[in-house]
Amino acid sequence: MTDAVAIRPVERADLPAVADMLARLADHVRPGFKPLADVESLDRYGPTGLHLFEALVAVREGRQVGLCLYTYAFSGWRGRPGIYVQDLYVAPSERGSGLGRALLAAAIGREAPNGCSFIRLGVDKANAGAIGFYARLGFEIDEDDHEMVIEEERWGGLLGPP
């Protein structure tokens, strides 16, 4: 690996590689799981469309080898915005090279001028490697909060009469 890695914002031409990296990440965390994100949804909702998420790619020798996909969060307690890292992927050939850290640092570098003052992320409880990686960088498990989700098919109870 003699050529340097370039980290840059995702472009439309990167979207097939982004979809592939998301599929590889999903399979790594939950073997056999197939994410629903495809080129069309990434294009529609991402930085080349509605801007509902941002993404950075790491490129070495013309090949995408890393991804940091994030959204914005605002903390009423902090009174400041931050970023929520939804997906961080590093190709197996790049693991241990510092690329994951570099992707997070690039996201901070890009968003700190906009006032972002924290990073929040979720880690699959079974992904011990990722938990260790984030802990080494200084992330802590937030014992005060539980991440909760409600999927679209269950919105009836939320949107219907009380």
Image (tube, rainbow, N blue to C red):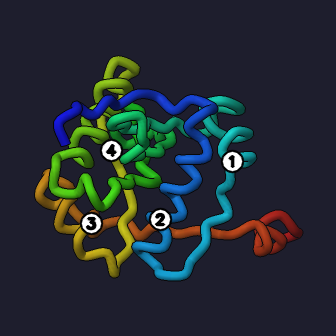
Q: Residue at x 68, y 54 (%)?
A: 38
Q: Give the residue pinned by disc 2.
A: 24
In primary-sequence order, the first of circles 4 and 2 is 2
- Kindly identify which residue carries mark 4: 119
Label 3 and label 1: CA atoms lie apart by: 26 Å
Mark 2 crowdedness (10 Å alpha carbons): few <14, some 14-19, many ≥20: many
Q: State if disc 2 and disc 3 touch (CB < 8 Å).
A: no
Residue ID for mark 1: 39
Between residue 67 and residue 123, name the one nearer to us: 67
**Viewer-nearest residue: 43 or 138:** 43
Furthest residue toward right: 161
Question: Between 3 and 131, which is closer to the camera in this rendering?
Answer: 3
* Residue 134: % across, % down: 21, 58
Across and down, in percent, residue 108 comes to 30, 32
15 displayed left or right of 137: right
Q: Residue 116 in the image: state x and y as whole percent.
A: 36, 30
- Nearest-to-viewer mark from 3 and 1: 1
Mark with earlier residue (1, 2): 2
Instruction: Give the amino acid type for the residue marked by disc 3 in the picture.
Output: Ala
Residue mark closest to the camera, 3 vs 2: 2
Circles 1 and 2 in contact, beta carbons < 8 Å: no
Q: Earlier in the sequence, mark 4 or mark 3?
A: 4
Q: Secondary structure at mark 4?
A: strand
Q: At which x and y percent is residue 151? A: 69, 69
Determine the CA span between mark 1 and mark 4: 26 Å
Label 4, residues with CA under 10 Å away: few <14, some 14-19, many ≥20: some
CA separation, marks 4 and 3? 15 Å
| Cα distance in 3D space between marks 3 and 2 | 15 Å
Q: Is residue 76 above or below residue 161?
A: above
Say whether marks 1 and 4 touch (CB < 8 Å): no
Q: Residue at 65% of width from left, 69% of height from top?
A: 150
Dot label at residue 130: 3
